Image (cartoon, grey):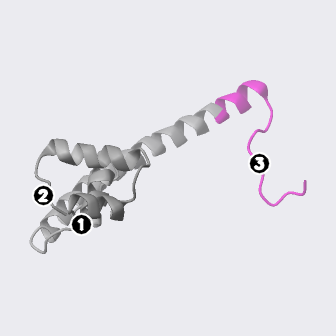
Amino acid sequence: MTMCITSHLDKGVIVAEYLLGKSTYRQLGLKYDVDFRIIHSWVMKFQGKEKPKKKSANDTPQKAVVNLDEALVVLTEALHKEKLRNELLNTMIDIAEKDLQISIRKKFGTNQ
């Protein structure tokens, strides 16, 4: 408990030591005089599994409105594309039924 970790290199050494399986978070915390939870956060950040930061009370309403507006635009575009796809498929079935002179669509309520 004599060392204070401040440099990026020291963090990298601790993360590497953990990832090599040589020590646990708690062992490294005692060895380098760092809270084991901080070491855990360094490892998670290195692995790209960092927890999303909590939203502040001031950011939430404005960001939520922006996110909802963006989501609405994306969903509206997706709905439009699916409607066009549905129309295309129905037209293809109509043409196939006309050209092949067979019924492709299932008739509801009939016994199979």
Image quadrant where residue 5 sits? bottom left
Which residue is at 39% across, 46% downward? Answer: 19
Residue closest to the eye, 56 or 66: 56
Name the front one of labels 3 and 2.
Answer: 2
Residue 49 rendering spot, x and y as whole percentages: 35, 52
What is the number of the mark on residue 35? 1
Circle 2 Cα neighbour tier, 10 Å, few/some/many (<14 / 14–19 / ≥20): few
> Where is the N terminus found, in terms of image quarters?
bottom left
The residue wearing badge 3 is 106
Residue 94 rendering spot, x and y as whole percentages: 65, 35
- Disc 1 residue type (three-letter): Asp
The residue wearing badge 2 is 4
Would you place residue 26 above or below residue 80 in this image? Answer: below
Which residue is at 9% across, 72% downward? Answer: 58
Separation (CA) of disc 1 from disc 3: 66 Å
Q: Which residues are magenta?
A: 93-112
